Image (cartoon, rainbow, N blue to C red):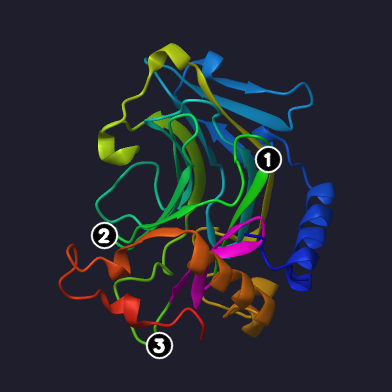
Amino acid sequence: MERKASSMAKVLLIGIVIAILCSEIKCSFEDNFSKSDCPDSHFKTSEDGQIWYLSLNNKAGCGFMTRQRYRFGWFSMKLKLVGGDSAGVVTAYYMCTEDGAGPTRDELDFEFLGNRTGEPYLTQTNVYKNGIGGREMRHVLWFDPTQDFHTYSILWNSHQIVFFVDKVPIRVYKNANYTNNFFPNEKPMYLFSSIWNADDWATRGGLEKTDWKNAPFVSTYMNFNVDGCQWEDPFPSCVSTTTQNWWDQYNSWHLSSDQKLDYAWVQRNFVTYDYCQDIERYKVKPEECWLSPWD
């Protein structure tokens, strides 16, 4: 299968704007992030500080989070995932309203589920509103994410949330034109990443366990980019939408024609699970599943 090439000029322009942004502000790890409480040996950087390595062994994983919270925007980072036999290992890249799994949190998840050598990586996305998730989708990827860096991005505005892989939209999660309890749009979020052991569920439902002989497991990061509304208490400028930013304007409220072609290609070839289609799990289809990603 060959992906239909698309120009996607708008997204390329976004990349240029973000690159200019990062040339004007400090983009080192220390300027943007703080490290979780993990051993120093589990977090390393390249000599120039632009590439970051998180590692996991049978004693501890590691993670980091942004120093700033955001409400709406474009959030992007390049990752290279754990290679070889990574069954049971999860690399997470996500946004959340708090540092912890609180009962009222909002959250937008990319989770990369490790595999046995030779098996495809699974990418799981999920959306939480007020502590309620269960909105998983899973995709296989059209490349080996352990061989090189690939870009994983989230577009978040009051109309839709779109998960991108290398500028290709793999999931579209729409808001409704009424007050609801499924679309997170009220609370600011931090951006996180972590590597951790989840062999109770991550690979074949927990049947494949982590082989610690292969430790340490290392995930690699670079090129964090954000073009979003920074939340500042007590009167944040992003308390409501203003349409002053490209990610909050009409063209970002829905997919472009080229993006729809790419999204259709992904839907046909790479979706392995969609909670909206799981009638055993949800006897009544969740209300957000009736909203069309094409609108």
First in sequence, mark 3 or 1: give its number: 1
Label 2's element?
loop
- Report the magenta stretch's main SS: strand
Residue 162 in magenta stretch: yes
Q: Is residue 202 above or below residue 261?
A: above
Instruction: For marks 2 and 3, give the CA distance.
Output: 20 Å
In the image, 105 versus 50, the foreground residue is 50
Residue furthest front as drawn: 1
Magenta stretch in the rendered image: 157-174
Label 1 Cα crowd, 10 Å radius (few <14 / some 14-19 / many 20+): some
Q: Is residue 25 left or right of residue 78?
A: right
Q: Which mark is residue 149?
A: 1
| Residue under the image location 77 percent in, 59 percent down | 15
- Specify the label residue 167 is tagged with: none
Q: Relative to the observer, which residue lies in front, 2 or 68? A: 2
* Disc sitting over residue 132 in the figure: 2
Among numbered discs 2 and 1, the one appearing first in the sequence: 2
State whether residue 158 is above or below residue 270. Answer: below
- Residue 153 in percent (x, y) is at 60, 56
Q: Are marks 2 and 1 in contact (CB under 8 Å)?
A: no
Q: Amino acid at mark 1?
A: Phe
Quadrant in which the N terminus appears:
bottom right
Front-most of 98 and 280?
A: 280
Q: Secondary structure at mark 3?
A: loop
Q: Quick one: SS at disc 1?
A: loop
Callout 2 amino acid: Ile
**Mark whose residue sits in front, 2 or 1:** 1
The residue under label 3 is 177
Asked if residue 182 is among those painted magenta in the image, a careful observer would answer no
